[in-house]
Amino acid sequence: MDLDLVKIKKVYFIGIGGIGISALAKLAKTRGMEVSGVNDEEGKTVDLLREFGIMVTRREEFFESMPSERGNSFSFSDLYVYSDAWLNRGPEILEAAKKTGKPVLSYAEALGVFAKDYKVIAISGTHGKTTTTAMVADILIDAGIDPTVIVGSFVKKFGSNFRSGKSQYLVVEADEYNRHMLELHPYIGAITNIEADHLDCYKDLDDIKMAFDQFLAQSQNKILDYGEYMGKVPKLLVPGEHNKKNAALALAIARMLGLDENLTKKSLEEFQGTWRRLEKRGVTESGTIVYDDYAHHPTEVRASIEALREFYPTDQKKITIVFQPHLYSRTKALFKDFAKCFKGIDKIILLPIYFAREAPDESISSGKLAEAICENGEKAIAFTDFELAEEYLKGLTFGKDDIFVTMGAGEAYKVADQMLKFS
């Protein structure tokens, strides 16, 4: 889309608390724009936005706090950017934005507009995008390149999902949902891997492959095969074979940029991971180790379990996973795989499906998934709300022989916040 950012003085973000869109809001702020937005809940992203000097209004306060007279920052914004989730969560706010007659863009469309001012290094793929993007960002920072970074998590090196840099490079996580990555025309386009997912907006795996082919076609330089770098990956602090693959891709990108290999390897050796990517949150007084993980696809669940077992063999620790399925459509399309992906876990507690951008679908539920998991020989139980799950968990005993994991792209981590004390 052709949009002159020089003429944009005020931007309003609808669903500003999302992990990707909040990073873009910070980028707009660093570009000198007046930024504000609306969100439906509080949380870490919203707290950091306010610390960044961005005003965030709660959804229920939206119409009350935005007067209809002059001074209404909503009506007088030059650009509106919305999160896809708010097509369902806040359609009335989107309609109000459209009535202003000003440009209204999705997060992906707006990212594509802002990205035109940079040499973009875009990491896409089905799994591993966030970690690989963070690895590449760390490498460029350590090399003194000073990149701007937008990533779908908080990177431990700079404590945010956004970093403002002074160089020409923008390192960005390119989401494949609804072909969002096609809004970018990268200097380097990299694909971690390709698998069936987001079948609510893709017909099948072939349709997904065609979209990624287009992504590569509009990339100046492209990286798809990075197998030759697997043998060069140093010992990592983050566990799992999947992270070795992420690091191999990061090595390939660094090589394409002409960076020193020893410096690159040292950066990878020191990489500490990101928020919610098999993140060790702490240890309780009784010795239980608490993790949180963003895994929400069967392949990701398996990879995380394998990584945990790499650190904690079966004869050493028992693992309890509190899992929240993400999207009715994904749970339904990959139901058989979800039923089999928790193999070897001692207890599986399922929370209600996180609907995100979707309308409810009564044909699928966490209860049905729990039954299928049990049929495959594991121990699973489902709850209809968080409070019931927490009450059940409070009746269990966790000690030094236990690993407690909250897992999923939704809000499963809140269970540990509510019922466990750890540091």
Image (spheres, rainbow, N blue to C red):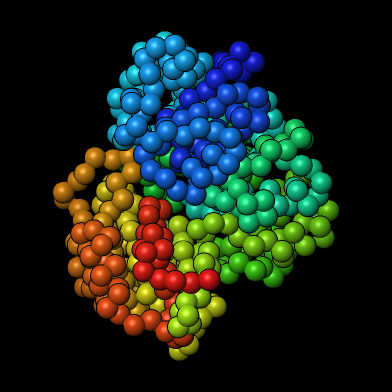
Q: Quadrant of residue 356?
A: top left
The x and y percentages for residue 203 are 33, 39
The location of residue 331, given as percent across then percent down, is 29, 53
Q: Is residue 228 visible from the viewing direction of this image?
A: no
| Rendered residue at 19%/68% (across/down) | 371
Residue lying furthest left: 362
Which residue sits at x=39%, y=48%?
Answer: 197
From the viewer's side, name the closer residue of 311 and 259.
311
Residue 299, picture quadrant: bottom left
Counting from the top left corner in percent of width and height, residue 193 is at 52, 52
Q: In this view, does 279 lie to the left or right of 138?
A: left
Task: State whether residue 37 appears in this view.
Answer: yes
Number of marks in picture: 0
Q: Position of residue 211 (x, y in %)?
A: 47, 36
- Give residue 59's quadrant in the image: top left
Q: Indicate whether 406 appears above or below 127.
A: below
Residue at image x 33%, y 58%?
324
User: Does 131 sit above or below residue 57?
Assistant: below
Name the residue rendered at 64%, 45% in the picture. Answer: 223
In this rendering, position of residue 409 left or right of residue 134 = left
Relative to residue 32, is residue 102 drawn left or right?
left
Compared with residue 100, is residue 282 higher up or lower down, i.e. above or below?
Answer: below
Task: Relative to 109, say whether 282 is above or below.
Answer: below
